[in-house]
Image (cartoon, grey):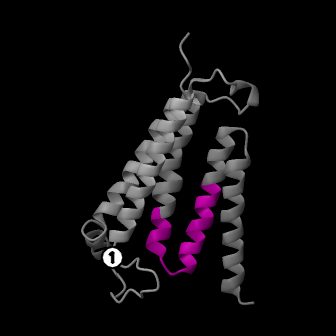
Amino acid sequence: MGFDQFLFFVFAGVAVLGSLLVIGQRNPIYSVLALIVAFFGLSGLYVLLEAPFVAVVQIIIYAGAIMVLFLFTVMLLNVPREDAAEWDRAHPYYRPWALRVGTALAVVMALQLGWALSRTPGLGVGVADERPAISSVAELGRVLFTDYMFAFEVTSILIIVAMVGAVALARKRES
């Protein structure tokens, strides 16, 4: 086993362990911190793939800006730890109409994401991408905001929907 393969297993283990800790924590603050650890593991994998720009962007944007925003949101909303007693049948989000609306929105979002991915160039199953590798940040920006613009915008909408959903679920019910 070579050193690169050893590093791959280390970074992959960090990313998987961090991801498991995100969903296994009861305290949302610890979940956010575990997600930062998972992002650093992914950044290490990008370095092994010889994509240092993507690795730096992963750390600066996701582990830096977005996770600070998530941490700020969690602390601002003062989300309590997860307790089963709080989610009884009287909870407003447990009602059948909310479940139907949420399911319909999830299906629409999955269909939209599938459609966006099917229209994104270079993602065909079993088809090798014959375009040359992008070597400069300027070329990456041009390709990102021309060829992949729709997928980029769908991703930003997905992040906004997730934030609004988190705020709506964490909001305390007025008496």
Quadrant position of the C terminus in the picture:
top right
Residue at 58 percent of width and 60 percent of height = 39
Q: Nearer the viewer, residue 65 or 27?
A: 27
What amino acid is labelled 1 in the image?
Pro
Image quadrant of residue 45? bottom right
Above or below, comparing residue 134 to residue 156 in the picture: below
Q: In x, y percent, where is residue 37?
A: 64, 57
Dot 1 corresponds to which residue?
A: 121
Image quadrant of residue 57? bottom left
Packing grade of label 1 (10 A; few <14, some 14-19, many >=20) is few
Above or below, comparing residue 94 to residue 22 in the picture: above
Q: Tally the marks.
A: 1
Q: Is residue 143 left or right of residue 171?
A: left
Quadrant position of the N terminus in the picture:
bottom right
Q: Nearer the viewer, residue 167 or 61?
A: 167
Q: Is residue 122 left or right of residue 1?
A: left
Q: In x, y percent, where is residue 73?
A: 52, 35
Element type where label 1 sits in the image: loop
Residue at 46 percent of width and 44 percent of height = 104
Q: In x, y percent, where is residue 143?
A: 28, 73
Residue at 72 percent of width and 60 percent of height = 17
Residue 69 visible in the current orientation: no
Q: In x, y percent, where is residue 157?
A: 37, 49
Residue 90 visible in the current orientation: yes
Q: Main secondary structure of the magenta part?
A: helix
Magenta residues, as a range? 36-57
Q: Is residue 25 left or right of residue 123?
A: right
41 is within the stretch colored magenta: yes
Residue at 57 percent of width and 35 percent of height = 74
Image quadrant of residue 152? bottom left
45 is within the stretch colored magenta: yes
